[in-house]
């Protein structure tokens, strides 16, 4: 009887350790493992190695667990039939199966899920050593199962998970509210395009390059923009941009007769389909603060500034010179009024005819 109890305990303990180890290793997220590995702790570095190549360690755990269950059951059955006889063998098998479920599955896995990090660090080094011992067998198994398990490597996290983590961190006080909001705004950079951020052409301030400072003095002085578009015959023929302070300085210096084109700086162009994150990189690379946005036909759709992109991250930026907070909204209203006016004119022409 003592022999039967010892073998049964060995099977339950061995199976329980395998279940606990497997659950703990898989419960620690890859991000958490990378964070732990930066501490320089040896077990954390080993754990990172295990997570980056999880197939062999898991195959090793499964093999050992099955060895305990299969061969343990054979030995226990053989000993039980001798000690208890065939009459009590069925009852013993039922009780032993119940104990296996409780003490070798449910309890170890529950504890492993609750204390995943601590247990994973504790078993990392022993698991790596055992995996090396069983490697010839796991290689064979991996080769046989490769046609059924070969798939593209899935990402360790996603945009939605990061947003949820930021939201949870804010609720639990780990990060501040404004930090959480900024994390969510960062992802908007990849969702927004230049056409979503630009000031539409209908409300863009521009000057014709052939005109003199004297002819444009009122427009320049009343402009709310520090950078003014300079055009040729039409707005679709952009010559460049002029800085308002340079134009005002020239007027004060008595250069009113000079054409606007002499104060023009070069300007860069982007498609209206350009993503906001690409726009930000473009601004950083060029060192510019304004870019002209082109539509699908090559015409000017509007202009976008560095400020427009930064507002996605930090919210609306309004200084003491801004008379209108949302120029895009004003442009939409103005466009709507013009379209309605054109519709009325067309109806009147139809009635007259």
Image (tube, rainbow, N blue to C red):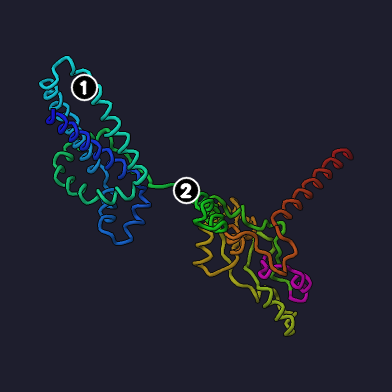
Residue that extends furthest to the left in the rendered view of this protein: 82
Q: From the image, tell me which residue sits under label 1.
A: 92
Distance Cα–Cα, label 1 vs label 2: 52 Å
Magenta segment range? Answer: 212-231
Residue that extends furthest to the right in the rendered view of this protein: 352
Which residue is at a point 18% across and 39% down the rendered structure image? 138
Q: From the image, tell me which residue sits under label 2.
A: 159
Residue 344 in picture, x, y percent from top left: 83, 43
Which residue is at a point 69% across and 63% down the rendered structure image? 233
Tell me whether the residue at label 1 lies in contact with that at label 2, contact meaning CB atoms closer than 8 angstroms: no
Residue 352 in picture, x, y percent from top left: 89, 40
Residue 274 visible, this angle = no
Does residue 196 belong to the magenta stretch? Answer: no
- Closer to the camera in the image, 306 or 113: 113
Q: Is residue 171 above or below residue 234?
A: above
Quarter of the C terminus within the rendering: top right
- For marks 1 and 2, give the one nearer the viewer: 1
Which residue is at a point 38% across and 52% down the rendered structure image? 31
- Closer to the camera in the image, 273 or 150: 150
Residue 170 in picture, x, y percent from top left: 53, 53
Point out the tag, 1 or 2, that comes first from the N-terminus: 1
Quarter of the N terminus within the rendering: top left
Label 2 CA crowd tier, 10 Å (few <14, some 14–19, many 20+)? few
Residue that extends furthest to the front in the rendered view of this protein: 2
Q: Secondary structure at mark 1?
A: helix
Residue that extends furthest to the bottom in the rendered view of this protein: 253
Residue 172 in picture, x, y percent from top left: 51, 52
Q: Is residue 209 left or right of residue 88?
A: right
């Amino acid at each position: 009887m003592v022999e039967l109890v010892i073998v049964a305990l060995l099977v339950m303990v061995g199976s329980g350790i395998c279940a606990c180890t497997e659950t703990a290793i898989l419960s620690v997220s890859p991000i958490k493992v990378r964070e732990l590995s930066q501490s320089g702790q040896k077990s954390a570095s080993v754990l990172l190695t295990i997570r980056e190549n999880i197939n062999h360690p898991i195959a090793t755990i499964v093999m050992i667990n099955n060895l305990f269950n299969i061969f343990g059951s054979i030995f226990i059955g053989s000993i039980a039939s001798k000690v208890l006889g065939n009459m009590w063998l069925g009852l013993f098998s039922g009780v032993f199966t119940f104990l296996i479920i409780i003490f070798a599955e449910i309890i170890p896995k529950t504890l492993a899920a609750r204390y995943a990090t601590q247990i994973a660090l504790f078993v990392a080094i022993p698991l790596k050593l055992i995996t090396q011992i069983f490697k010839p067998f796991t290689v064979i198994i991996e080769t046989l199962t490769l046609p059924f398990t070969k798939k593209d490597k899935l990402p360790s996290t996603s945009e939605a998970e990061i947003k949820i983590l930021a939201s949870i961190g804010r609720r639990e006080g780990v990060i501040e509210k404004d930090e959480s909001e900024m994390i969510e705004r960062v992802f908007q950079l990849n969702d927004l395009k230049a056409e979503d951020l630009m000031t539409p052409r209908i409300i863009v301030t521009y000057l014709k390059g052939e005109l003199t400072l004297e002819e444009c003095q009122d427009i320049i002085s009343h402009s709310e923009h520090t950078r003014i578009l300079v055009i040729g015959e039409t707005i679709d023929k952009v010559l460049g941009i002029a800085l308002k302070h340079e134009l005002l300085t020239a007027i004060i210096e008595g250069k009113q007769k000079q054409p606007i084109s002499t104060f023009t700086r070069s300007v860069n162009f982007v498609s209206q389909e350009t993503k906001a994150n690409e726009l930000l990189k473009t601004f950083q690379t060029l060192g510019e603060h304004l870019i002209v946005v082109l539509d699908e036909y090559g015409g000017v759709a509007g202009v976008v500034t560095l400020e427009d992109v930064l507002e996605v991250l930090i919210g609306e930026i309004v200084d003491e010179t801004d008379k209108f907070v949302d120029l895009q909204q004003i442009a939409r209203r103005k466009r709507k009024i013009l379209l309605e006016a054109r519709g009325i004119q067309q109806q009147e022409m139809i009635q007259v005819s």
